[in-house]
Amino acid sequence: MGNYRGGVASATVIHLRGSDATPVVPRPRPVIDWFGDGSLVVVDLAMACCAIESEFAVPAGALHRSDVPEGARVVVVVSGTVTDLLAPEVAAVIAGLPGPHVVAFGSCACAGGPYWDAYCVTKGIDQWVPVDTYVPGCPPPPRALAEVVDAVRGGRRPDAPGVLGGVPT
């Protein structure tokens, strides 16, 4: 389990600039070397409140890297509300990563959450990119993300019974 270190330092922040509301998507800044050995890295595309939960899931010994090590598995966590304006940018970031395992973390990333009926909210990131694992909840517990990452590293299906520790998938 992670230890809260005050802030969402590892998240890739997507923001809007100017009157035309053009999204500015920086390159994913440091990827999280989850186990500290280069075997698996996590890129957290954090857009709303679920970012706090996903940051809390990061183990205390995790390293922050500026690149994806060769041969490392990549887990991309899309957490929070994805708007129709930001969805293509999120998809572009994911497309730029080598063979990512995409996790929709939280009900907003899974299906639009409580904002599903807003005209500007994407009804799940799976409308733009294939999603490998859905972690529902508003917000889902940090433990659920940690268990998904552990399952991916171990070569298990993250949606197999018992993997998410009782969190319905």
Image (spheres, rainbow, N blue to C red):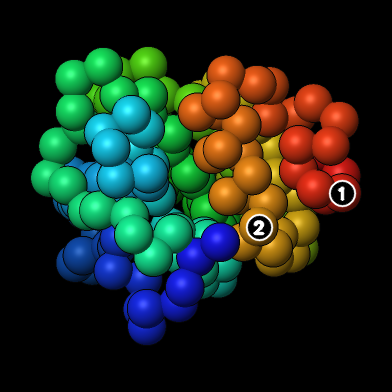
Q: Residues within 10 Å of mark 1 (few under 14, many from 20)?
A: few
Q: Residues within 10 Å of mark 2 (few under 14, many from 20)?
A: some
Tell me the SS state at disc 1. Answer: loop
Query: Left or right of 95: which side holds 49?
Result: right
Pointers 1 and 2 in contact (C-beta within 8 Å): no
What is the tally of numbered marks visible in this picture?
2
Q: Which residue is mark 2?
A: 143
Q: Quadrant of residue 164?
A: top right
Residue 80 showing in the rendered view: yes
Q: Is residue 48 above or below residue 62?
A: below
The residue nearer to you, when weighing 63 against 122, is 63
Name the spot of residue 83 as percent of width and height, x first.
51, 51
Tell me the SS state at disc 2. Answer: helix
Q: Which residue shows up at 86% across the image and 30% down it?
A: 161
The residue nearer to you, when weighing 83 against 50, is 50
Residue 23 showing in the rendered view: no
Q: Which residue shows up at 68% across the image and 51% down it?
A: 144
Labels 1 and 2: the sequence-earlier one = 2
Q: Which residue is mark 1?
A: 166
